[in-house]
Amino acid sequence: MKSFRRHISLARLAVSALSAVVIVSGQCLPAQAGEIIVSAAASLTDALTVIKKAYEKENPGTTIVTNFGASGTLLKQMEQGAPVDVFASADELTMDQAAAKKLIDPSTRVDFAANSLVLIVPIASKVHVSSPADLAGPEVARIALGNPDLVPVGRYTMEAFTTLGLAETLRPKFINGESVRQVLDYCARGEVEAAVVFATDAMVAGDKVRVAAVLAGHKPIDYPVAVVAASGNKGPAASFLRYLTSAAGQDILAGYGFAKPGGR
Amino acid sequence: MGAGFIIPLGITLKVAVTATLCSFVLGVGLAGLFSRRPFAGRDLLDAACAMPLVLPPTVIGYYLLVVIGRKGIIGSWLLSVFGVSLTFTWQGAALASALVGFPLVFTSARAAFAGVDENLENAARTMGAGELAVFFRISLPLAWRGVAAGTLLAFARAMGEFGATLMVAGNLPGKTQTLSLAIYEAVQAGRDSDAAVLVVLTTTVSLAVLFGAGKLAKKKY
């Protein structure tokens, strides 16, 4: 009986310790003063990480928390109430959807970068691919692209393939990726014979993938950014947006292969 | 619309049944082997076999991708010898689910075999039964309740597997999109009504299987 009682008190101790941990961690507020949360398209991962550091250096009172993912996924998070301050998407469509759902402040919306679409192959690949038409060949079994339902690069890819009249021929070979970086990863690992990503993503994995062709036949790829309507830090958020379009921000973006926005 | 729900159901059942069969054979086999007699390093191996329970499914999926991917140790061998690649296939999804479900069968079976009266096994041995006969005719039948419970758990786990499957098999509608992946995609794309139907379908099927299996277990008595 005595050991049973000891087990009960040990269990009670464990439960109180666990509750204490849960309560304490729950007290952490979603954003402390001077902290802004930026949800940005996956293709901006490297450039924005550098921009974040540069911005924090120039503005010591502000911390930036970055949240990267497919633009569609980020929109979904915001819809469900994620405490985001700035939203940067890889296409106008997702930002239009955000505006329609009243999630962003439309007066702050501005284009800050542009990109192009490229066809890539694993660097050690022996399969001959030098143009989109080669993808119809028997040697190409799998083509990775973004899921057109929620990844902007997937939508642009389908646009390009449709313009070229290849969409239906290639459809059985499609492997959907949940974000542009996953598509890039599939190609870098050699799991697919070809993939379609942004030029900036191909640059990042330059040692594992090779650009076979630049794709045309799609709407211009402009990246819009806006302050989120429900943000509690509109001031610092707007200031970050200004930095993105400033010479310093644009320089960093150019370093990662982004072009100047095409103007809208 | 109906096809959009039946196809993922078919794939899920295909993957779950295959995965459960594999984890059953491997789990019961290894548990039986380990239960025979203590050997050096048994405790460590027991812990290693239970590891997939503790690891996040995405980590398991990552390890699998590294090993059976086209550039992986096993993957490249499979590719060069058989010309097969397990990534983006339902077989790859089944492998992921089997790995995730294996510790459930293994730990339950280990406990069940440990509970079998050694005297009964020894009695069989004195009557001339070989080790395999002892296992299949004495140990396993006596331990079947624990083994069955573990196997059912593994099946339920395989029905709902998501993280490891997504990593290894991708989310290809008609090929590897299981019910959980279909729900995920429907929610992401804003098709909440589709997601709701899929959730009800998954819940109903899983409940039916577990309930049915429970009834079968009772029928013995």
Image: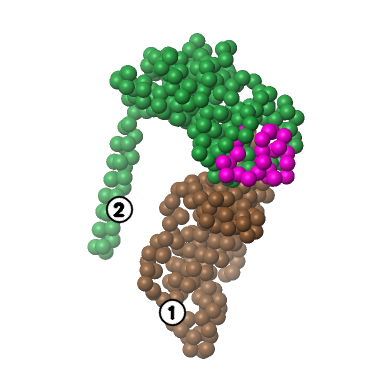
Chain colours: A green, B brown
Task: Indicate the amino acid at tag 2.
Answer: Ala
Q: Secondary structure at mark 2?
A: helix
| Residue B143 visible in rendering | yes
Image location of residue A151, percent across then percent down = 58, 30
Point 32% across, 22% down: residue: A57
Q: Quadrant of residue B188?
A: top right
- Residue B120: x %, y % from top left: 47, 81
Measuring 48% from the left and 51% from the top, which residue is drawn there? B63
Q: Furthest residue to the bottom?
A: B127
Which quarter of the picture shows residue A217? Answer: top right
Horizontal side of A156 relative to B125 (left or right) equals right
Q: Could you tell me which quadrant the C terminus of chain A lies in?
A: top right
Q: Residues within 10 Å of mark 1 (few under 14, many from 20)?
A: some
State how many labels appear: 2
Can residue B215 be seen by looking at this rendering? no
Q: Residue at x 55, y 80 (%)?
A: B133
Give percent across and percent down for residue B111.
Answer: 44, 67
Amino acid, disc 1: Glu
Q: Mark 1 or 2, which is nearer the eye? A: 1
| Disc 1 target residue | B118
Specify the segment rendered in magenta.
Answer: A119-145
* Residue A164 horizontal/vertical position (percent): 73, 28
Q: Which mark is residue A11?
A: 2
- Is residue A215 found left or right of A78 in the rendered image? right
Task: Determine the residue positioned at 53% across, 73% down.
Answer: B140
In this rendering, the answer to whether B128 lies above or below A66 is below
Instruction: Indicate the chain on which mark 1 is placed.
Output: B
Give the alpha-carbon distance from disc 1 to disc 2, as whole Å: 34 Å
Query: Does A248 sit left or right of A21 as displayed?
Result: right
Q: Compared to A172, does B42 lie above or below?
A: below
